[in-house]
Amino acid sequence: MSAAEHETFIKTPKQLITAVVLSFVVPILIIVLLVKYVGAGDRGGSGNNALTPEATEARIQPVARFELKGAGGAKALRAGEEVYKAQCSACHAVGAAGAPKVGDAGAWAARIKTGYDALLNSALKGKGAMAAQGGGDFEDIEIGRAVVYMANSSGGKLAEPKAPAPAEEAKK
Ligand code: HEC
């Protein structure tokens, strides 16, 4: 057996002190690094995004939000011509499927004589080849306006229906 086999790293008091200090410092360093690594993500508390303009605005907005709505509900009511162009002109501009053509006073005269209520009723519920609301999805008053627009473009003199109760108020 040689003497070298009994040797250790620590030979002097200075080396012993170094070894003792390192045995404390190294684990602590590892722990510190681990903690930093775990906490590297988004931290809560101060320093988060609580002060961004959006967050501030959401925080200070009034409890009840105020929304201005038209008399007829959330969406603005469309004018008769608008509804006609969107939904009714497909048939009524050309007279498709036997529809009375807008502008053709002769085709409308007899119908207009039945009165606004009757015309509106036909337009709302459908008549012959025409589906209810001409197949559209509108407020009744919007259909009423379209009926008036169409009839008045075809020799009629119907009064523009007024919201919110067009059918009862408007007359021939
Ligand atoms: C699919 C084709 C079609 C569309 C779309 C259509 N109509 Fe008609 N409409 C007709 C036909 C066909 C008639 C004739 C019905 C009959 O007298 O048998 C008619 C008749 C009418 C009449 C006369 C009803 C009466 O009592 O004499 C009115 C008013 C009318 N339509 C309004 C409208 C309005 C308003 C729209 C859009 C919202 C519309 N139509 C969309 C086909 C259509």
Image (spheres, helix red, strand yellow):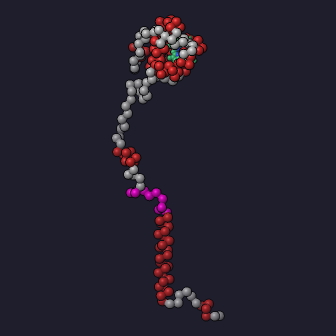
Vertical placement of 171 versus 81: above or below?
above
Question: Exactly how many numbered labels are in the figure?
Answer: 0
Task: Determine if residue 133 is in view.
Answer: no
Q: Quadrant of the N terminus?
A: bottom right
Residue 25 vs residue 53: left or right? Answer: right
Where is ligand 1, by quadrant? top right
Q: Determine which quarter of the picture holds residue 164.
A: top left
Looking at the image, which residue is at 38% across and 33% down? 67
Q: Position of residue 111 (x, y in %)?
A: 50, 8
Vertical placement of 27 versus 141: above or below?
below
The part of the chain drawn in magenta is: 38-47
Task: Determine if residue 35 is in view.
Answer: yes
Q: Position of residue 71 (x, y in %)?
A: 38, 25
Assess whether residue 44 is covered by the magenta stretch.
yes
Assess whether residue 144 is covered by the magenta stretch.
no
Looking at the image, which residue is at 37% across and 45% down? 57
Q: Quadrant of the C terminus?
A: top left
Instruction: Please tell me which residue lies in front, 49 or 6.
Output: 49
- In the current view of this chain or complex, which residue is farthest to the right? 1
Q: Position of residue 86 (x, y in %)?
A: 52, 22
Instruction: Please tell me which residue lies in front, 41 or 104.
Output: 104
Q: Main secondary structure of the magenta part?
A: loop
Looking at the image, which residue is at 39% across and 29% down? 69
Vertical placement of 105 versus 66: above or below?
above
Looking at the image, which residue is at 52% across and 13% down? 102
Instruction: Please tell me which residue lies in front, 91 or 142.
Output: 91
Q: Position of residue 152 (x, y in %)?
A: 46, 12
